[in-house]
Image (cartoon, rainbow, N blue to C red):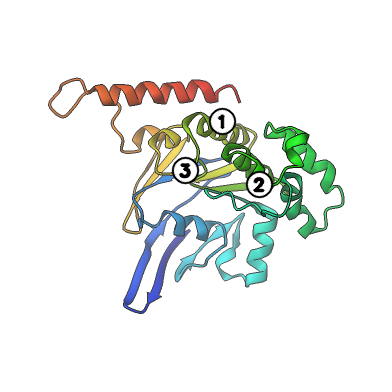
Amino acid sequence: MEVTKIYRMPRGSVKALDRVNLSISAGDFISIMGPSGSGKSTLLNIIGCLDVPTSGEVFIAGKNVSKLSESGRTRIRREKIGFVFQQFNLIPTLTALENIAFPMLLRGERRHEEKSRALLRAVGLSEELGEHKPAELSGGEQQRVAIARALANDPEIILADEPTGNLDTKTSREIMGLLKALNERGKTIVVVTHDPLVASLTRRTLRMLDGRILSDGGATDSGETYSGESDSGEIDSGATERSDREEEWKAQTETF
């Protein structure tokens, strides 16, 4: 893809994406980092066919999705893409199992009950919790339900916008462990995050600023310094602590 996205506002135009050139291979595990307003979520929305570029083209599995109608993009989302959001976006009046089944019902899936229970178990939740509504679940449990829902139609791509943003450190590790395990099973995963520790668990990190990609490399190139030394050459205890925490995260997520 090579795209520009401009939003027309009453006080003038805002260029959310400025000639962003990006290629994502099947099986990639990518994090996108950058300050608020850098274009991260806009890029994710365009990858996920939730928005279209002002100029440029987006190809998914060889198909130019930026030229599709709204119904065509909806079909791509249902068949190829699963979404995980920071706010979970579960339907409050449905149980966990019913939330998981919802995308399957939209497709007319007949075995949705059996598959929903299997997905619930796959993300580490009991069938008893499956009968609870979102308000009766913890944040971590809600995010696990959201991941199970994202997997309902067996998508090739999972897009996660700040999936650990509302979670504590322990639960964040567990959620990233789930995403890592899914990637190891062949899913292509793109995660928007502000957290360098989350980014360190992905294989590739993009850093964005003012609608452009500043760097594109492995997690160790994410722009965070973990060498343990300050610019003056002195040992930086904060950087050492961050490095230790990063290793702890990686060790604990290996269990998933």
> From this viewpoint, is residue 155 visible?
no
Q: Earlier in the sequence, mark 2 or mark 3?
A: 2
The amino acid type of the residue labelled 2 equals: Pro
Q: Distance between the residues labelled 1 and 2?
A: 19 Å
User: Exactly how many numbered labels are in the figure?
Assistant: 3
Q: Nearer the viewer, residue 93 or 217?
A: 93
Residue 92 visible from this viewpoint = yes
Frontmost residue, 235 versus 220:
235
Residue 134 circle label = 2
Q: Which of marks 1 and 3 is nearer the N terminus?
A: 3
Q: At x 12% / y 26%, what residue is drawn? A: 232
Of 65 and 251, the residue lying toward us: 251
In the rendered structure, find residue 165 and report the number of the disc placed on it.
3
Q: Which residue was labeled with disc 1?
A: 174
Type of amino acid under label 3: Gly
Neighbours of disc 3 within 10 Å: few (<14), some (14-19), many (20+): some
Give the label, 1 or 2, closer to the camera. Answer: 2
Residue 34 lies left or right of residue 63; in this view the side is: left
Foreground: disc 2 or disc 3: 2
Q: Which of 138 and 171 is in front in this view?
A: 138
Secondary structure of residue under mark 2: helix
Q: In this view, does 194 lie to the left or right of 114?
A: left
Q: Quadrant of the C terminus?
A: top right
Closer to the N terminus: mark 1 or mark 2?
Answer: 2
Which amino acid type is marked by label 1? Glu
Q: Give residue 226's position: percent from left, percent from top.
A: 30, 27
SS type, badge 1: helix
Where 252 sits versus 115, above or below?
A: above
